Image: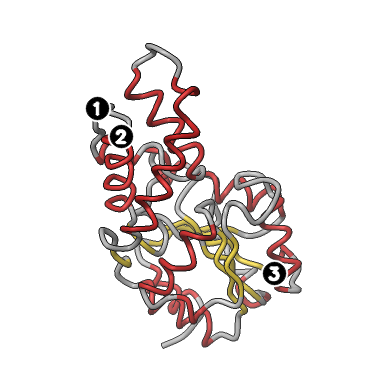
Amino acid sequence: MNRLDDVLPLLEAAIVDLDGTMVDTLGDFVVALNLMLDDLRLPRVDAAVVGGMVGKGSEHLIDSVLRHVHGGAGDPAALYAQAWQRYQHHYLAINGRHSAVYDGVAEGLAALRARGLRLACLTNKPTAFARPLLAAKGLDGYFEFVFGGDAFERKKPDPLPLCKTCEALRTMPSRTLMIGDSSNDARAARAAGCPVLLVSYGYNHGEPVRGVDADAFVDSLAELAGLLGQP
């Protein structure tokens, strides 16, 4: 499905998600969370569990993991402050070491830049995690702006972060493409008035991504060159 044909010639900018869209960070999440759980003397979690919880910010991820390991017993909220502190400590130490850039990402970002589009990275990941990860993976140079989940009052799927990012880019939402991997990105884009393209390989809370209301889907960001009419 591609409903972008009429929009592509009008685009002035693109907003790109990070986790599950540009970088497969599931390994980082699993390692940091399990080190956190070790500190709290709680059972570990595996990648299958964590993969369904990623995408709504670190606060939601930690809360979900604590509720999962407690299995309904006790009060996970009582451990949250300590868990958040330990998670931050461990994530900053291993950030990027257990993650990899998806195939085609550099080509896709280069195609967007070659088209003259202004680029911003918008993620629910804390800014202190996002910026070092982009730098470590050699992706930071593509973006004029990097906004994490703590940059604005609300996170995706609320449209506020997209609207604020469009303001920073000085573009209208209707001329700003949202590129992501989940219903969070699509819902935020729809509410903000941005066209939206989703990748097929991300996390999407464990649900089939092609069931999400989006204007187009790609299996690799390298396909952007073809969509933009580049050789």
Q: Name the image quarter holding residue 19.
A: bottom left
**Marks 1,3: beta carbons within 8 A:** no
Q: Say if mark 1 contacts mark 2, CB within 8 Å.
A: yes
Q: The residue under label 3 is which amino acid type?
A: Arg
The disc placed on residue 37 is 2
Residue 209: name its quadrant.
top left
Say which label, 1 or 3, has the lower sequence index. Answer: 1
Query: How many angstroms separate mark 1 from mark 3 (CA)?
Result: 47 Å
At label 3, counting other C-alpha atoms closer than 10 Å, the crowd grade (few under 14, some 14-19, many 20 or more) is some
Residue 212: image location, x then y, percent: 50, 43
Residue 43: assigned label: 1
Q: Which mark is residue 175?
A: 3
Determine crowd level at label 1: few under 14, some 14-19, many 20+ residues with C-alpha closer than 10 A.
Answer: few
Give the vertical position of 39 relative to 194 (above or below): above
Q: Earlier in the sequence, mark 3 or mark 2?
A: 2
Is residue 30 shown left or right of residue 164?
left
Where residue 108 is drawn, which disc sits there? none
- Left/right placement of residue 76 relative to residue 124 reads left
The Cα atoms of the two marked residues, 3 and 2, are separated by 44 Å
